[in-house]
Image (tube, rainbow, N blue to C red):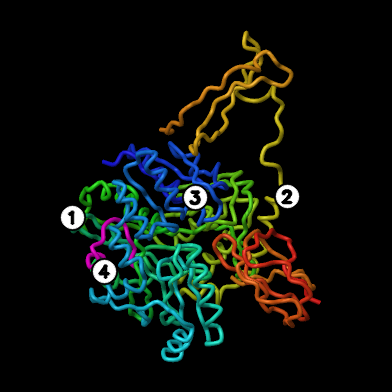
């Protein structure tokens, strides 16, 4: 069995992996960027090491820095989580080259299935048909125009080496091709480290159904059940559930068998997800995510299996402890992703900032997987997922009611969240009847009331009480008054030595006490405890709505613009947002350039 794991990720998934490894007696090593020094995953790990930087490219995509920590700590395996380097074959190969184990599929399988183009070819060779599309990377906008005119608009441009909706743009006409292609490439490069994209037909009213698979290195592969991930905004999932409503058992079996065929065809091992689009009684292979999915707890709640534990067992060389006939799915499970986003008018604008309150819900069969606690900061540089709330019940209507109750109990302040939108979704008749699709939320759900609730929630946290009121030293816990050592405060602080994070316990003199000013500190080794954004003032100033980075400037001084016209593109929390002119007129000044870091309230463009 593996003894020590380096978790090459951050946030919720890093915390999730650390928890299971702790149960299995596997020590954990965390990584942290400059802005993650005191993050929750860092606090939970047995050891933590600095890798520097703030942006993903400088930190969690920095392969050399990660491999350096791997060697320094003599760790025997690396768990990549999801996102960042999880589907990077070069990284997996580099880990294996050090003699460590990569907790995931072989690099060759990642290359085949992590590349969405070659994965389509592999699926077709296994007899599983895909959505009509191309099998080569796009090199010129004219290719997109030709494909759209031949198959009909709209079409989807998608990142070849990614997933989760990152780097995906829907193109409605030939006039939109150039801008969409540039944006898709930028997002793909920023989130996955590669900018190759491809295209496929964008189905009019599909459901997004994925099948969880698990395979070992001894030729065994099983499917654990499907998840309906159709409730999406900006092509990213908000709510996932299983079983998929309205699915027959025959359809489920056929999809599961197709997923196993694809898995075996590419020599796959460890956890993976085969994704399908379903429309008019037919399903089409979409892609394979060669990693653990964000929504894996849905399957865990339904089957009683810990997927991270299975991952670690397979990575240790063991055979799968379950066969297909052993897998039993009971009841209904639903997950809501709680993101730091303002769902105002369905725009879902990222909302970075400090979380001042985070209170989890209670009650039976409700699970909150969080990557943050009250007092933690949500950085503009990373994904905005705060937590996932997962519930289980014997029947779907009961699960919906339980999730609504649990979401209503969840208290998060300091940033806007998607909770009001998710409550509106769960209350909608279409969702309750299971007749939604991947386009349903953006086209048919009115989120104006949810927007007001989200704005109120965020404002209350930002203007509320301070995180911690000053405390009189005489009232602080840990105080050691009197005695021959004088009045001392027993406290623990964090320190960094040679790139490694430590907790240091200090005996400090209370104010006015000089008797113990020269007492030494004692180092304590860490122990393991058992979219488009209207960002204008209503006048001539186009304001920055949130902290982020300007990635594209679309106008220059002297240009004539119309109300609602995009003037620049802002990237925040790994999402691109077009900033619009609030009125028509002539551009007087442009105060930003590509690559600029900007803050909320900054004036980007002045129009007169």
Q: Residue at x 59, y 45 (%)?
A: 376
If you read the primary sequence from the N terminus, does the residue marked by circle 3 or circle 1 appear first? 3
In the picture of the structure, the residue carrying the numbered disc 2 is 463
Cα distance in 3D space between marks 4 and 2: 52 Å
Discs 3, 1 touching: Cβ within 8 Å: no
Q: Which of marks 3 and 2 is in front?
A: 3
Quick one: 223 or 183, which is closer to the camera?
183
In the figure, is residue 247 to the left or right of 55? left
**Element under disc 3:** helix
Instruction: Kindly tell me whether residue 362 is visible in this rendering.
Output: no
Residue 310 is situated, as x and y percent measured from the top left of the image, at: 29, 50
Magenta residues (range): 263-274
**How dense is the environment of label 4, judged by Cα within 10 Å: few (below 14), some, or many (20 and up)?**
many
N-terminal-most mark, 4 or 2: 4
Give the vertical position of 333 relative to 494 (above or below): below
Disc 3 from disc 2: Cα separation: 26 Å
Q: How crowded is mark 1: few (under 14 residues within 10 Å), some or many (20 or more)?
A: few
Q: In this view, does 355 lie above or below 123?
A: above
Classify the position of the N terminus by image quarter. Answer: top left
Tell me the tag on residue 218: 1
Task: Tell me which corner region of the image, top left, top right, bottom left or bottom right, holds residue 90.
Answer: bottom left
Q: Distance between the residues labelled 4 and 3?
A: 31 Å
Q: Does the magenta stretch include residue 264?
A: yes
Q: Name the residue under label 4.
A: 262
């Amino acid at each position: 069995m593996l003894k020590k794991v380096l978790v090459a990720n951050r946030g919720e998934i890093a915390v999730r992996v650390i928890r299971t490894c702790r149960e299995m007696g596997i020590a954990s090593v965390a990584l942290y960027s400059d802005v993650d020094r005191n993050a929750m995953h860092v606090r939970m790990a047995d050891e933590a090491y600095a890798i520097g930087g703030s942006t993903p490219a400088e930190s969690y995509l920095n392969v050399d820095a990660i491999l350096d920590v791997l060697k320094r700590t003599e760790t025997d395996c690396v768990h990549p989580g999801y996102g960042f380097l999880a589907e990077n074959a070069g990284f997996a190969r580099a880990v294996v080259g050090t003699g460590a184990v990569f907790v995931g599929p072989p690099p060759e399988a990642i290359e085949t299935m992590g590349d969405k183009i070659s994965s389509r070819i592999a699926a077709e060779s296994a007899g599983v048909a895909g959505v009509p599309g191309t099998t080569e990377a796009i090199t010129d906008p004219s290719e997109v125009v030709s494909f759209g005119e031949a198959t009909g608009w709209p079409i989807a441009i998608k990142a070849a080496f990614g997933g989760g909706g990152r780097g995906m743009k829907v193109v409605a006409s030939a006039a939109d091709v150039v801008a969409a292609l540039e944006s898709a490439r930028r997002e793909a490069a920023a989130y996955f480290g590669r900018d190759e994209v491809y295209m496929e037909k964008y189905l009019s009213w599909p459901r997004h159904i994925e099948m969880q698979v698990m395979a070992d290195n001894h030729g065994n592969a099983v499917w654990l059940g499907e998840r309906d991930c159709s409730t999406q905004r900006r092509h990213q999932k908000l709510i996932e559930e299983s079983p998929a409503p309205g699915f027959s058992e025959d359809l489920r079996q056929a999809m599961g068998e197709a997923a196993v065929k694809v898995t075996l065809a590419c020599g796959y091992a460890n956890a993976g997800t085969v994704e399908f689009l379903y429309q008019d009684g037919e399903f089409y292979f979409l892609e394979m995510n060669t990693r653990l999915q964000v929504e894996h707890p849905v399957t865990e709640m339904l089957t009683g299996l810990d997927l991270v534990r299975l991952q670690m067992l397979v990575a240790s060389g063991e055979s799968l402890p379950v066969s297909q006939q052993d897998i039993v799915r009971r009841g209904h499970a639903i997950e809501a992703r709680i993101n730091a986003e303002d769902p105002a008018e369905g725009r879902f604008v990222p909302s970075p900032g400090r979380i001042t309150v985070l209170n989890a819900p209670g009650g039976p069969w409700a699970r909150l997987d969080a990557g943050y606690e009250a007092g933690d900061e949500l950085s503009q540089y990373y994904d905005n997922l705060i937590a996932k709330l997962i519930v289980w019940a014997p029947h779907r209507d009961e699960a919906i009611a339980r999730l609504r109750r649990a979401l209503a109990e969840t208290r998060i302040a300091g940033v806007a969240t998607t909770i009001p939108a998710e409550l509106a979704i769960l209350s909608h008749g279409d969702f309750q009847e299971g007749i939604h699709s991947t386009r349903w939320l953006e086209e048919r759900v009115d989120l104006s009331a949810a927007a007001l609730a989200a704005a109120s929630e965020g404002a209350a946290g930002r203007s509320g009480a301070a995180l911690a009121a000053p405390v009189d030293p005489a009232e602080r816990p840990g105080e050691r008054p009197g005695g021959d050592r004088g009045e001392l405060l027993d406290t623990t602080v964090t320190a960094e030595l040679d790139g490694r994070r430590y907790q240091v316990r200090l005996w400090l003199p209370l104010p006015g006490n000089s008797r113990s000013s020269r007492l030494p500190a004692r180092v304590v080794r860490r122990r393991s405890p058992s979219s488009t954004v209207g960002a204008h003032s209503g006048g001539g100033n186009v304001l920055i709505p949130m902290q982020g980075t300007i990635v594209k400037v679309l106008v220059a001084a002297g240009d004539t613009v119309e109300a609602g016209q995009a003037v620049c593109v802002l990237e925040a929390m790994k999402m691109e947002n077009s900033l619009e002119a609030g009125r028509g007129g002539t551009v007087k000044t442009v105060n930003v350039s590509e690559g600029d870091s900007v803050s909320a309230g900054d004036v980007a463009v002045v129009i007169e």
